[in-house]
Amino acid sequence: MEDIVLKIKDEELKELQGRVNIINQAQLQIGQLETQKHNMLHELATSQTVLKEIQDKLEKEYGKVSINIVDGTYEPIKEDEQQANT
């Protein structure tokens, strides 16, 4: 006796495979994007830490000042401005 093989139509199989492929590709791309996001968040945190160190170093040398990051000029921060910012 022969075993009967039950099978969906070829076009249905292709449609099914195509959709599963799209899902798999989307999941792969999401994983890659999440990895990039993680790396960027790490770089952001590192840059913020380094910026704080630079700010502390500049404050030690110049005191409490407001620095124009375009041209490097600075102005002392007045005492009342310091209190308003805290």
Image (cartoon, grey):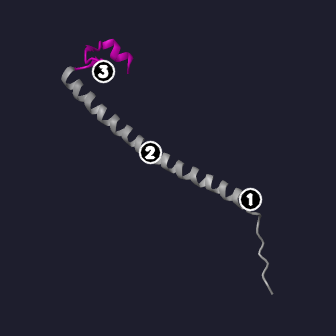
Task: Give the percent coordinates (x, y) of residue 5.
Answer: 77, 75
Q: Which residue is mark 2?
A: 36
Q: Residue at x 27, y 33 (%)?
A: 53
69 w.r.t. 39: above or below: above
Q: Nearer the viewer, mark 1 or mark 2?
A: 1
> Mark 3 or mark 1, which is nearer the start of the sequence?
1
Helix, strand or loop status at disc 2: helix
For label 3, the crowd category at 10 Å Cα-Cα, with few meaning under 14, some 14 to 19 and many 20 or more, is few
Q: Nearer the viewer, residue 62 or 74?
A: 74
Q: Which residue is mark 1?
A: 11
- In the image, which residues are magenta? 63-86
State if disc 2 and disc 3 touch (CB < 8 Å).
no
For label 2, the crowd category at 10 Å Cα-Cα, with few meaning under 14, some 14 to 19 and many 20 or more, is few
Q: Amino acid at mark 1?
A: Glu
Helix, strand or loop status at disc 1: helix
Q: Residue furthest front?
A: 10
Q: Residues under labels 3 and 2: Cα distance?
A: 28 Å
Q: Nearer the viewer, mark 1 or mark 3?
A: 1
Task: Give the percent coordinates (x, y) of residue 78.
Answer: 29, 12
Helix, strand or loop status at disc 3: loop
Locate residue 80: give its quadrant: top left
Q: Residues under labels 1 and 2: Cα distance?
A: 37 Å
Q: Which residue is mark 3?
A: 69
